[in-house]
């Protein structure tokens, strides 16, 4: 059958294009305009060229925020992915127990981000919070508003609690799509539990895992509400991540010029990482 | 349009991007691109190479503007050469 090329169909995309232009492209262009100017108010602004970019790239606080951001994303991902796979493997396969497990595991995903922050804020208080109180009773000096290590550990624990269920649910659905015949064949071959995981389950999970990693990377890279509520970026600036530094600069201090330059750099990093993930996924699917 | 706080350089930048996209579309219409493998580790079409080129050019500009005292025009020149190499042999 000959395929007829009809490019007129592209005009059907026009409404979406207009919407995206209105909500994303034109605002982004405005951000670029802001990034090369010193804006005082709507009528007073001066062209400063690439000065903001130079200042932002050499700002020690922002460089450290970027490092912290990568460290945070890397740490949470390297805990959440194996843990999520483990939970998915242990979950019951059918019946009432399976439904109950699914509901219980999905619960943290339903809680709004700032509420997650509040829950953990109270949970870690040594006077009224269960975890803070228990640690104090056990003689552990734990204080998230004084000790950066405690603050970091708590934020990572909070993120793991909040988002491991996503990985677990994705993996669970991936595992359920493996036909029973594969396991039967493995039993005939007397394959060990590890061999089944390594040669049957893991390959079948690759696609959902890549999507999970991409989602979790982007989400953790733009994390804002939870640490903002839990620690407020402190103690000092030890848990101030990029989005919080950006918000403080743009809305708190109304430094729209540097904030715009900062947003563009942030955007380029996310674009580059997402593109690498996207290309990897597409190439893996092509190879199949 | 005044709320968008345009400046001549940014207007020039976006007109440039617009012209590149428009001419690439016309080129694609006149002679459709075929996926091929060059020195990049993946198969790419012309549009892919343009995207990779623009994104890496952005980082080249950031690097030169942020960490050297060279003029931004040096970054643009390096990016233009890199873009040409990438489009031809990428």
Image (cartoon, rainbow, N blue to C red):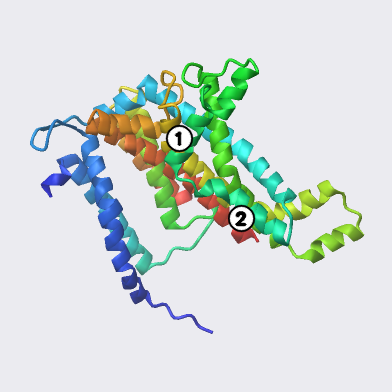
Q: Is residue A87 left or right of residue A190?
A: left
Relative image position of residue A153 (x, y in whole percent): 56, 26
Q: Which is more foreground, mark 2 or mark 1? A: 1
Residue that carries the numbered disc 2 in the rendered image:
A284
Residue at 28% in and 46% down: A28
Q: Is residue A138 left or right of residue A238?
A: right
Does the image show residue A70?
no
| 2 and 1 marks on the same chain | yes
Residue at 47% in and 27% down: A67
Quadrant for the N terminus of chain A, please. Answer: bottom right
Q: Chain of mark 1?
A: A
Does the image show residue A115?
yes
Relative image position of residue A232 (x, y in whole percent): 40, 27
Q: Residues within 10 Å of mark 2 (few under 14, many from 20)?
A: few
Q: Is residue A191 left or right of residue A285?
A: right
Sequence-wise, the earlier of marks 2 and 1 is: 1
Label disc, if present, on residue A6 of the rendered structure: none
Asked where in the image residue A204 lies, by quadrant, the reply is: bottom right
Label disc, if present, on residue A118 of the rendered structure: 1
Relative image position of residue A44 (x, y in whole percent): 9, 33
Asked where in the image residue A40 lies, by quadrant, the reply is: top left
Direction left: furthest residue? A43
Q: Chain of mark 2?
A: A
């Amino acid at each position: 059958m000959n395929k007829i090329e009809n490019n007129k169909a592209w005009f059907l995309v026009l409404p979406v294009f207009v919407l995206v232009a209105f909500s994303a492209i034109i605002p982004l262009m405005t951000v670029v305009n802001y990034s090369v100017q010193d804006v005082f108010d709507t009528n007073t602004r001066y062209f400063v060229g690439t000065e903001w970019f130079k200042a932002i790239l050499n700002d020690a606080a922002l460089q450290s925020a970027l490092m912290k951001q990568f460290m945070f994303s890397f740490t949470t991902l390297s805990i959440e992915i194996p843990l999520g796979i483990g939970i998915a493997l242990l979950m019951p396969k059918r019946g009432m127990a399976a439904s109950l497990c699914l509901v219980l595991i999905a619960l943290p995903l339903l809680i709004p981000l700032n509420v997650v922050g509040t829950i953990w804020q109270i949970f870690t208080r040594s006077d009224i919070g269960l975890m803070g109180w228990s640690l104090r009773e056990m003689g552990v000096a734990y204080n998230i508003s004084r000790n950066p290590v405690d603050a970091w550990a708590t934020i990572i624990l909070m993120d793991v609690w909040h988002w491991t269920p996503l990985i677990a649910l994705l993996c669970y659905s991936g595992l359920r799509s493996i036909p029973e015949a594969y396991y039967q064949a493995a039993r005939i071959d007397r394959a060990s539990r590890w061999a089944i995981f390594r040669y049957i389950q893991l390959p079948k999970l690759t696609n959902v895992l890549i999507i999970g990693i991409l989602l979790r990377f982007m989400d953790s890279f733009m994390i804002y509400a939870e640490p903002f509520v839990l620690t407020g970026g402190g103690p000092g600036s030890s848990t101030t991540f990029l989005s919080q530094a950006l918000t403080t600069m743009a809305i708190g201090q109304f430094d729209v010029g540097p904030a715009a330059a900062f947003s563009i750099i942030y955007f380029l990093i996310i674009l580059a990482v997402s593109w690498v993930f996207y290309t990897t996924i597409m190439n893996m699917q092509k190879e199949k | 349009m005044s709320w968008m706080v345009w400046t001549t350089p940014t207007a020039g930048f976006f007109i440039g991007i617009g012209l590149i996209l428009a001419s690439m579309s016309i080129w694609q219409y006149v002679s459709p691109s075929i996926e091929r493998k060059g020195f990049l580790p993946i198969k790419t079409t012309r549009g892919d190479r343009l995207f990779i080129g623009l994104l890496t050019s952005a980082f080249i500009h950031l690097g030169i503007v942020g960490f050297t005292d060279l003029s931004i025009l040096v970054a643009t020149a390096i990016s233009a050469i890199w873009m040409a190499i990438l489009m031809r042999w990428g």
